[in-house]
């Protein structure tokens, strides 16, 4: 889909590399500028899944000659992604102004937690910090429990990387139609708050309020996870009455007057306790088999390894390649051949090749 588009990625953490991987998955020529002689990011493998399908060049962005190579590379690109604190790229002499001087149509993508300009723009933070201040963490647990979300998904990836991808694509369209570049300011704080707008629409209709545990999706007995006898878990979220009716029938609770009162908030705590006891009486796979193929909106909680072998994975969503488990690109497009994982490059693997393309060969 993005064949012919070149993206320059300045080596960074989490969301930026993920956004660049997503664009590479879509066919863009992504060149990652790795730090010359730099070490692998703590906690990340030498050959990261996030680098699949990219090319790698090592540059020292404090070296004047390497800065010239970087700007020569920028001159050939459609977009650039960086994830430094605000002001770092400018101090290196490769901020938006310098890059637009050599490439006026460049889409300059900036990935931060707090944004380029804000009260906390120069302050460190991580996924949980961004989404806690944005409001996105507020409903992320059962009543009485400390809010917690799956690591990185709501902030770094959902509110960060995917908004950067959307901004980059919009910027590329603008450059094509107007001939001018743009700067994309993708802040995880902003994106995670923006993702709340579906809940805000439910709140607008009276289904959500400030009190956790008394809302349409975070309080009912029919919208939560339950522990099973073997330590596994089942999820239940049968919002619509017709699906809730199927759930009750399968659980043999369809004649229970209390359970029939689906939206009576006064009954929710007691019914939650009752369901907890029922689910705890049998192992997860018993319940998974009971609900499999039905419209009861109940499903087991699987690990990624279990998802790999589940019948849903006939789509090839999870792939194990050379011992590395990873998810296939999403979304999918017609007229695109079947996907197989691309190799992740060695650091600097394509340095000579890329410098030759730029006419800056070095011995």
Image (spheres, rainbow, N blue to C red):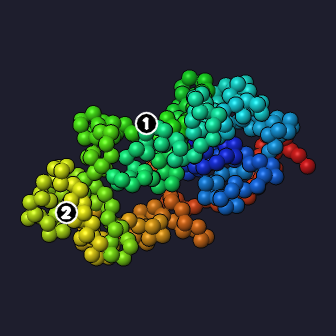
Query: Which residue shows up at 85% across the image and 39% down it?
Result: 63
Counting from the top left corner in percent of width and height, residue 88 is at: 72, 34
Q: Is residue 343 above or below residue 289?
A: above
SS assignment at label 1: helix
SS assignment at label 2: helix
Q: CA distance from mark 2 to mark 1?
A: 33 Å
Q: Which residue is mark 1?
A: 194
Q: Which residue is mark 2?
A: 247
Counting from the top left corner in percent of width and height, residue 23 is at: 57, 46
Depth check: give the residue in front, 140 or 356.
Answer: 140
> Could you tell whether 203 is left or right of 92 in the image?
left
> Could you tell whether 331 is left or right of 8 in the image?
left
Which residue lies most toward the right here?
A: 363
Counting from the top left corner in percent of width and height, residue 71 is at: 76, 34
Choose the circle earlier in sequence order: 2 or 1: 1
Query: Which residue shows up at 37% across the image and 46% down it?
Result: 139
Can residue 281 be seen in this snapshot?
yes
Q: Residues within 10 Å of mark 1 (few under 14, many from 20)?
A: some
Depth check: give the residue in front, 272 or 297.
Answer: 272
Q: Is residue 286 above or below residue 245?
A: below
> Could you tell whether 214 is left or right of 358 in the image?
left
Q: Is the Cβ of the residue at disc 2 closer than 8 Å to that at disc 1?
A: no
Counting from the top left corner in percent of width and height, residue 231 is at: 38, 73
Which residue lies most toward the front here?
A: 144
Depth check: give the residue in front, 323 or 187.
Answer: 187
Query: Which residue shows up at 29% across the image and 72% down it?
Result: 280
Q: Is residue 85 above or below residue 24?
A: above
């Amino acid at each position: 889909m993005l064949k012919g588009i070149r993206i320059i990625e300045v080596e960074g953490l989490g969301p930026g590399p993920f956004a660049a991987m997503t664009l590479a998955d879509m066919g863009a020529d992504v060149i990652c500028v790795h730090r010359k002689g730099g070490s692998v990011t703590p906690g990340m493998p030498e050959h990261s899944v996030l680098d699949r399908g990219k090319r790698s060049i090592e540059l020292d962005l404090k070296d004047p000659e390497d800065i010239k190579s970087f700007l020569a590379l920028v001159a050939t690109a459609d977009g650039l992604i960086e994830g430094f604190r605000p002001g770092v790229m400018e101090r290196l002499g490769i901020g938006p102004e310098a890059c637009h001087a050599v490439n006026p149509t460049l889409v300059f993508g900036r990935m931060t937690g707090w944004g380029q300009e804000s009260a906390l723009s120069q302050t460190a933070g991580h996924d949980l910090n961004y989404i806690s201040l944005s409001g996105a963490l507020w409903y992320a647990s059962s009543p009485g429990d400390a809010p917690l979300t799956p690591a990185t998904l709501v902030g770094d990836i959902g509110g960060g990387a995917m908004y950067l991808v959307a901004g980059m694509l919009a910027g590329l369209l603008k450059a094509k139609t107007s001939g001018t570049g743009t700067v994309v300011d993708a802040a995880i704080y902003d994106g995670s708050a923006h993702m709340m707008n579906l809940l805000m629409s439910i709140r607008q209709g009276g289904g959500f309020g400030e009190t956790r545990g008394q809302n349409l999706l975070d309080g009912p007995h029919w919208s939560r996870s339950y522990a099973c006898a073997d330590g596994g878990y089942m999820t239940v979220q049968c919002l619509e009455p017709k699906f809730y009716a199927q759930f009750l029938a399968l659980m043999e609770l369809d004649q229970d007057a209390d359970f029939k009162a689906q939206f009576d908030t006064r009954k929710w705590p007691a019914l939650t306790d009752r369901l907890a006891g029922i689910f705890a009486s049998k192992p997860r796979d018993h319940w998974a088999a009971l609900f499999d193929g039905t419209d009861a909106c109940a499903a087991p909680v699987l690990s990624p390894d279990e998802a790999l072998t589940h019948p849903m994975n006939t789509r090839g969503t999870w792939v194990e390649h050379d011992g590395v488990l990873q998810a296939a690109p999403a979304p999918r497009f017609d007229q695109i051949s079947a996907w197989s994982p691309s190799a992740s490059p060695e650091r600097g693997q394509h340095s000579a090749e890329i410098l030759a393309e730029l006419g800056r060969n070095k011995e």
